[in-house]
Image (cartoon, rainbow, N blue to C red):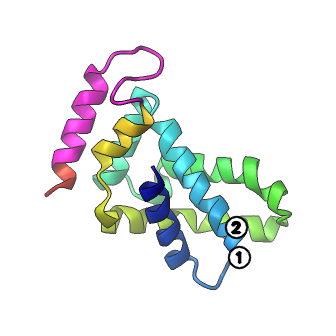
Amino acid sequence: MSAITDIILSQVKESAAGKLDKNVLSGLSNSILGSVKQSAQSASGIEQLTQLFTGKTNAADSPVTALAANIFKKDFVKKLGLDANMAQLATSLLPTILSALVDKKNGLDIASILGAFTGGGKTAKSGKSDLLGTAVGLLGKFLKK
């Protein structure tokens, strides 16, 4: 899991170079990671991740990005003491960061990520792996091309 976090933090730093301090960058990274994790916990979220990482949905319009922004606002804005302008600047970078992650993929193995976030391929609510297994398999094959 730390490798995933490192990749996301690296992309956040690259996309926001010189614009935000390290605590804000860390908050953005954690928000993206939280968004991916929460999205991977449901069938609709897996579909949203699949659409994002296959380019069927751009990052600016993705519910995954919107969730990351909500997590950042809820968990980090007050904690970091950000004013409205700084919070807006930070969240406005999320689509750029996620787009860069999708474009580069940075060695990300999305199938493994989804498996890690869902307990090895089982959905948290149903305990069934059929839908997740299919989504992970298709997404993994696509991303390896």
Q: CA distance from mark 2 to mark 1?
A: 6 Å
Q: What range of the chain is rendered magenta? A: 119-141
Was residue 135 drawn as part of the magenta stretch in this picture? yes
Q: Is residue 140 above or below residue 22?
A: above
Q: Which mark is residue 24?
A: 2
Q: Is residue 87 left or right of residue 59?
A: right
Tell me the residue at 26%/34% (across/down).
Answer: 135
Q: Quadrant of residue 133?
A: top left
Between 97 and 3, the one nearer to me in the picture: 3
- Report crowding for label 1: few under 14, some 14 to 19, many 20 or more residues within 10 A (C-alpha): few
| Amino acid type indicated by mark 1 | Asp
Tell me the residue at 48%/71% (across/down).
Answer: 10
Between 2 and 91, the one nearer to me in the picture: 2
Q: Quadrant of residue 50?
A: top left
Q: Measured from the top left, where is residue 86 in percent x and y?
A: 77, 71
Tell me the residue at 75%/64% (across/down).
Answer: 87
Q: Measured from the top left, where is residue 36 in percent x and y?
A: 48, 45
Dot 2 falls on a residue whose secondary structure is helix
The residue wearing badge 1 is: 21
Q: Measured from the top left, where is residue 82 in percent x and y?
A: 82, 65
Dot 1 falls on a residue whose secondary structure is loop
Q: Is residue 87 left or right of residue 34?
A: right
Tell me the residue at 84%/55% (across/down).
Answer: 78
Q: Is residue 130 above or below residue 16?
A: above
